[in-house]
Amino acid sequence: MDRMPLEEEVLLRMKQGDESAFTTIYRHYHSSLYIYLLRFCKIPSLAEDLVHDVFLKVWEIRDRINPELSFTGYLYRIARNHVIKTIDKLATDQLLREQLFSQLDEPADAHPEQLIRAKEYDRLFHEALTHMPPQRLKVFTLCRQEGKSYEEAAEILGVSRNAIKKHMVLSMRFIYDYVHRYGDILLAVYLVRKFF
């Protein structure tokens, strides 16, 4: 996004609490920020909510903005941090997950992109498994794919139940991080829904 004309002056006015300057900044950056966030989350309504959250944060911390530095970089860093926090929250907040899943639970024929997303998740999931350390993969295969209990897996592999539990936690984190890194927010949420 190009720097807006007289941006330093507008930022200085916003920093001093000028709402019209804030509106100018908002209008200038809104669409590019929306597109940027939409690439992460793939849900237009969520991307729009994230944009509003980011601009609300900008207004709240306006006194910390240095008009002489790149505002674009600052804005996108806030946006990136916010979307990562949102992904993390989706992994732990049951109500938030349910709200998002309700948007995803419409019939697949109404949204064929969901089928594509599911295939992409499966591809990334299997790719993650190929990158997992061998012992961790054995534990994951026994517990998640073969349905063995931690005790049964521990007996088969000749290790303690705690070792199995640790491998499972690390394997789930590894898969989640892999899908998050190479996919998008919906793939990460799909993973959370499938395994947590």
Image (spheres, rainbow, N blue to C red):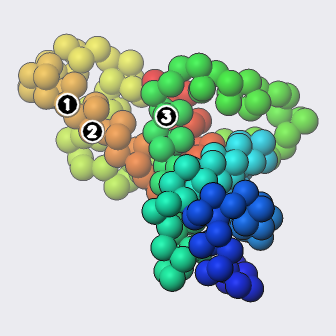
> In the image, is 148 to the left or to the right of 13?
left
Question: Where does the image place residue 174, in percent across and percent down from the top left?
Answer: 34, 45
Give residue 166's mark: 1
Residue at 24% x, 49% y is 133
- Residue 170 numbered mark, or none: 2
Report the quarter where the N terminus lies.
Answer: bottom right
Residue 134 visible somewhere in the drawing: yes
Q: Which amino acid does the dot numbered 1 rest on?
A: Lys
Amino acid at the residue labelled 3: Lys
Whole-percent x, y for residue 18 in the image: 69, 61
Near mark 2 (Cα within 10 A), the count class, few <14, some 14-19 or many ≥20, is some
Quarter of image, res 43: top right
Q: In the structure shown, which secondary structural element does the residue marked by tag 1 occupy? A: helix
**In this rendering, is residue 33 above or below 43?**
below
Q: Which of the two discs, 3 and 2, labels the residue nearer the N terminus? A: 3
Residue at figure coordinates x 49%, y 80% from the top left: 69
- Marks 3, 2: nearer the viewer: 3
Instruction: Return the residue nearer the eye: 80 or 160.
Output: 80
Q: Do the residues labelled 1 and 2 touch (CB within 8 Å)?
A: yes
Q: Say if residue 35 shows up in the picture.
A: no
Asked which secondary structure carries label 2, the reply is: helix
Residue at mark 1 to residue at mark 2: CA–CA distance: 6 Å
How many dots with numbers? 3
Q: Is residue 173 above or below residue 71?
A: above
Q: In this orientation, which residue lies closer to the viewer: 150 or 169?
A: 169
| Mark before the other along the chain sequence, 1 or 3 | 3
- Please name the amino acid that badge 2 sits on: Leu
Judging by the rendered image, the residue that carries numbered circle 3 is: 89
The answer to whether residue 124 is above or below residue 7 is above
Drawn side of residue 144 relative to residue 187, left or right: left
Q: Do the residues labelled 3 and 2 touch (CB within 8 Å)?
A: no
Residue 117: numbered disc: none
